[in-house]
Amino acid sequence: MAESISRSLRDGCLEGEHAPALTIEDSLASPLGSHVFDHFLANLASQIADGTSQARGLVLVALNRSPSFYIDLLRRKGVDASLVDKWVRILDCYSDPLGWKDRIPPLTNVQKPSTRENVSFFRDVRDINKLLSSVLDLGKGFVGQGKTRFAVAVDLVSNLLRHTSLPSVAGLLNNLRSNDQISCIFWLIHSDLHEPRVSTALAYVSTVVASVQPIMQLTDEHRSRRDFLWLEKNSCKAKFCVRLKRRNGRVKLLAEELHMDQVGVKFAAVTSENSFVNKSLLPKVQFNLQLSDQERVDRAKVVLPYEHQGNGEAIQIYDGRRSLSDDQKDPHLVQPSTLSAMTDAQANSGNGEIHYIRDSDDEQPDSDEDPDDDLDF
């Protein structure tokens, strides 16, 4: 599942579509969101350096950690230092987010730290319009005047919400996502620091919402015994729950386990002891959303009234997704010559007949494929 998110960020968007947007949520009970953000940041930067990503550069808006931290992080993840300087631009909103340092008289004996060419300072995060222009200006260094796109990452939206309103922040993210130069965008938010409407608003402008949830809940028993086992487990393991919006409007709910080690985060399938995660993600309704094994067997035994039942003819199955070359190799599919011969014979006899050709059972009823793509228009 984490790999599918990385592929979505790597592949970017199609012409005429908005860029894919990823929201990463965490809380104090499971504070691993920054590690998840670093994971996707390093993967995307590596893909940009290798030339396998649609984006030809990355603009990182640093609100929570210094630019030097991210440069060291990408180097530790194996991205070449020269490629980092070439394909990554950092907008430093961390060093002086409100411009206070400009009002302090400089000390004569203190030497100013040297600045890197790929780092730009931004000194008023309250000015959202200027922040948007600064991000796009940095991206122009990658795209020039062509149709090349670049990616945008915001390391912590919660810091931005401290100084400006929710509509302004949501508008900034939506304007970046809808810009035709943006390939993808993702950000991190500490959801427990804000009202629920904040997470709802950011989820509205996102195509993927990844929530980092605690693997063990804090109970009254833990508080009474001062048992910190829950803290130890939640500091190295978490549930990684994802809501993925499909192009056809459906929302797919998935879950994995997240493990921390010395290298970084690792994702794995949900173990049996934590299989309740998938059940908790399903909406509470009064009917079943999936067929049971017995119901699938019973459905397979249903006799279709317009399909011949073993009178010596081959069962014909229509699959509109197959090409002509595939059709010619499959003896069970209707050939154009056979269909025309049947039509001519019916016309000569003057008697009409109904020939039922069953659709393929390859696709499940809840498949993400277009439900109308097997219609023969």
Image: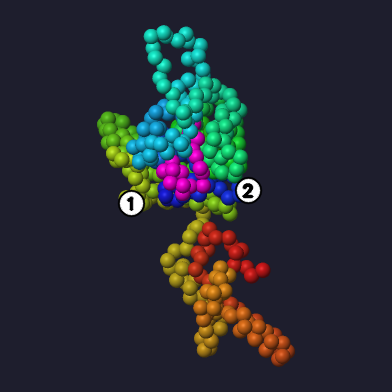
Q: Is residue 291 visible?
A: yes
Whether 206 is drawn above or below 270: the answer is above
Check disc 1 and report the residue beneath it: 271
Determine whether the residue tagged by mark 1 lies in a helix, strand or loop: loop
Q: Nearer the viewer, residue 134 or 269?
A: 134
Q: Residue at x 54, y 52 (%)?
A: 246
Determine whether the residue tagged by mark 2 lies in a helix, strand or loop: loop
Check disc 2 and report the residue beneath it: 16
Whether 21 is drawn above or below 226: the answer is below
Relative horizontal placement of residue 164, taking residue 40 as reference (left or right): right
Q: Quadrant of residue 206?
A: top right
Q: Residue at x 53, y 40 (%)?
A: 150
Q: Which range of residues does the magenta coloring cover?
A: 43-61
How crowded pointer 1 is (Cα within 10 Å; few <14, some 14-19, many 20+) is rated as few
Give the mark nearest the N terminus, 1 or 2: 2
Q: Residue at x 58, y 60 (%)?
A: 370
Whole-percent x, y for residue 219 in the image: 34, 36
User: Residue 54: within the magenta?
Assistant: yes
For badge 2, the amino acid type reads Gly
Numbered tag placed on residue 203 in the rendering: none
Whole-percent x, y for residue 50 in the image: 43, 46
